[in-house]
Amino acid sequence: GLGEHRAKAERMYSLMDGFLKNDPISLQKDILHHVEYTVARSRFSFDDFEAYQALAHTVRDRLIERWHDTHIYFKRTKPKRLYFLSLEFLMGRSLSNSVINLGIEDQCAEALNQLGFEFEVVAEQEGDAALGNGGLARLSACQMDSLATLDYPAWGYGLRYEYGLFRQIIVDGFQHEKPDYWLNFGNPWEIERIHVTYEVKFYGTVEEVEMNGEKQKVWIPGETVEAVAYDNPIPGYGTRNTINLRLWAAKPSSKFDLEAYNTGDYINSVVNRQKAETISNVLYPDDRSHQGKELRLKQQYFFVSASLQDIMRRFKEEHTNFDELPEKVALHLNDTHPSLSIAEVMRMLVDEEHLGWHKAWDIVCKIFSFTTHTMVTDGEKIPVDLLESLLPRHLEILYEINFNFLEELKKRIGLDYSRLALLSIVEEGAMKSIRMANLAIVCSHTVNGVSKLHLERLKTKTFKDFYGLYPEKFQCKTNGVTQRRWIVVSNPGLRDLISKWLGTEAWIRDADLLSGLRDHLDNADFHLEWKMVKKVNKMRLAEYIEAFLTLSLLQVSLDAMFDVQVKRIHEYKRQLLNIFGIIHRYNCLKNMDKDSRRKVVPRVCIIGGKAAPGYEIAKKIIKLCHAVAEKINNDTDIGDLLKVVFIPDYNVSVAELVIPGADLSQHLSTAGNEASGTGNMKFLMNGCLLLATADGSTVEIIEEIGEDNLFLFGAKVHEVEKRRQKRLSNLAPLQPAKVPLHFARVLRMVRDGYFGHKDYFKSLCETVEFGFGNDYYLLTSDFGSYLEAQAAADKAFVNQDKWTRMSILSVAGSGRFSSDRTIQDYAESTWKINPCRCPL
Ligand code: 9GP
């Protein structure tokens, strides 16, 4: 009874005296406790890594307390919840971020110090959680941080890949991929929930049965796999709210295997069951296309099914009527990858909860929202054959959704078959397939682009016909990044400086306050301190470069401009343009007399990024970068005037080091190709000037800081198509197209083997040659304006006062690019959720 319950509660309270304490002594005691009993080392002798493990567990205990409180509070207040469904999260490291968000960084540093350890060194022991590829995945991580900080009742769902994104090793200038078995050293940030498991079913057949006098479809699956939950607490900053990122791992089902029992084939049965685990084993390393692989589809459905079972269970615990679903649940599709959720919710409502089709569809259309992250028109497709065998019931449901959609459509547009075919969710043809983007658009109440320019593209090109049908669905949610990670964690010097001059730390929760830095634009002391922060960060980066590239004994000068391009390697991102620019710079230096050389701004050109393992051209770009580096760095005649560095294995923690240390950063995508870009925002926040095309979110950065405050170049979106046409019309009568002299020279050097590997680089050169790749990304026509922008950057760098002003104005204008702004916008206009702040 109630009395018994109360007595039990009182006993619990008396045994656990309140929350864990955060003073340095209490932290020390907890650290030592974890050294002794969790890590199982002697507290009298443990190393940096063991100190990291013990501190991580100490912090985790505190996260768990807040996490519990948050969940109890959400359960009690029953707010509408957001479920953020994403197959990728690039979380990076957790320690520094957690202690900052918990507000215990100084105490932790002091606690460690007294034990003879240094916080920075201990934090360096942590490996990255790299459960994602690039922009989309890091965006998810930033958005989770903002959801927690802004007190939204949200959960993230994803997959717990055992192998994260491959590690990039460079051997002889070539990229090699090594598996990232990131769990080897344990992961103190996750909590395994052995009791939170769901069965996920595959294959089998669909049968029709009579139920209460009505015909009902029943899926008889052929394979069952178990999904086990791993919870990752995500603490907000300046709040007790700590939300959850629940990742699923596949395990063999514990169900009795009757067939193996009957045939007595025990060993084979175990081996076969073990195969289940492969589902969540490995992250697909391609960030742009995921076409038609069975394992990928299995991953998607495994993730979708487990997440939705969990979400529905929670909903049913709190509510009895499915009519309430749209008021209580928002499901967000982070790209098309989780779009099978639509068919799955329909299946659950119709087949399991026995709602009528139309009622179920009405509910489904009110709960989903969708964000697309690409400019590519030819989106994700799932071959019907594959679906038919793996998820036969879902295929039927998808056909029915499509049938109803097309019937509705006919009423609106008539029998315009070519338009109907374009809009259809099912693509006919040699390989019949399901168009995941069409499915997501038809069913979602909002379709979001990730920058203004991206949205414009969606409306006028990619999804033009859908826009005609549902103009009200299309919205712009320009991306943002979290200033907690990208300034507070990664650039403590700048954090202190900003707080000092603004007289407050409030900007950490309200990035718009950064604009207040403009008030000190002409203050000489401020300039001095600003430059000093940059210098210290450059020093950190230089040490990293020198330590990493010991083989080539490279030394970089701190007086040089640190010019950085770090991101996935893609033709459209045009790392090749950067390398060609470097070769051109080298040629100019070689031709200069001593006097002119004295006026040159020395440069350290830093490039980093991974190429998808099967993307040959991208891999050649990496090799070319190394070949050029080898030539230039070993040319004693050039000395410090030009150095080229490729930073291997670019990931979140490397970014935290590289970005604060950059003077200039390059964002070179051919206009109309980068949906948003988020690297540009991180550099902007760190006072690094941008050299960029007017693409993706850079257009909005220009709105904030003005064209004069960055180095803009290249064709604008509306010019790109014209230039391509022009180039092709040059080709038609077989006239040699006009290629600028400098460009032709650089290209010839690479083609003729000046940097070695002549045959190997041939196909790379052909991508920009006429009659071959036809320079689809317009390197040729943008080269001149690129060089001008580079020259303008050099000129500005000479005038350090001007440069510093531009740098300050960059940070001051970066407030709009906080993911807090993005998330608030989503919450208010798309998800319709309210903050739900757990009381202290
Ligand atoms: O390529 C886009 C990038 O422009 C954008 O900033 C990011 C986040 O919205 O998503 C990237 N897309 C992907 O990573 C996969 O399509």
Image (tube, grey):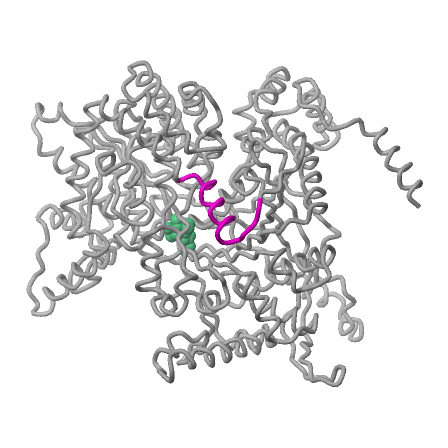
Q: Is residue 725 above or below residue 21?
A: below
Q: Position of residue 518 (x, y in %)?
A: 32, 25
Residue 3 drawn in magenta: no
Q: Position of residue 684 (x, y in %)?
A: 34, 35
Compared across the picture, whether 245 is left or right of 499 comes to: right
For the point 34% across and 64% down, the residue is 462
Compared across the picture, whether 163 is left or right of 68 comes to: left
For the point 45% across and 65% down, the residue is 441
Q: Quadrant of the C terminus?
A: top right
Image quadrant where residue 255 sits: bottom right
Main secondary structure type of the part rendered in magenta: helix
Is residue 69 something that shows in the picture? yes
For the point 36% across and 68% down, the residue is 468
Compared across the picture, whether 145 is left or right of 701 comes to: right
Q: Is residue 77 above or below residue 9?
A: below
Is residue 611 something that shows in the picture? no
Residue 832 drawn in magenta: yes
Q: What's drawn in magenta, residue-wise?
A: 817-834
Image quadrant where residue 102 sits: top right
User: Which of the two residues, 50 or 241, is positioned nearer the viewer here?
Assistant: 241
User: Which of the two residues, 491 or 349, is positioned nearer the viewer here?
Assistant: 349
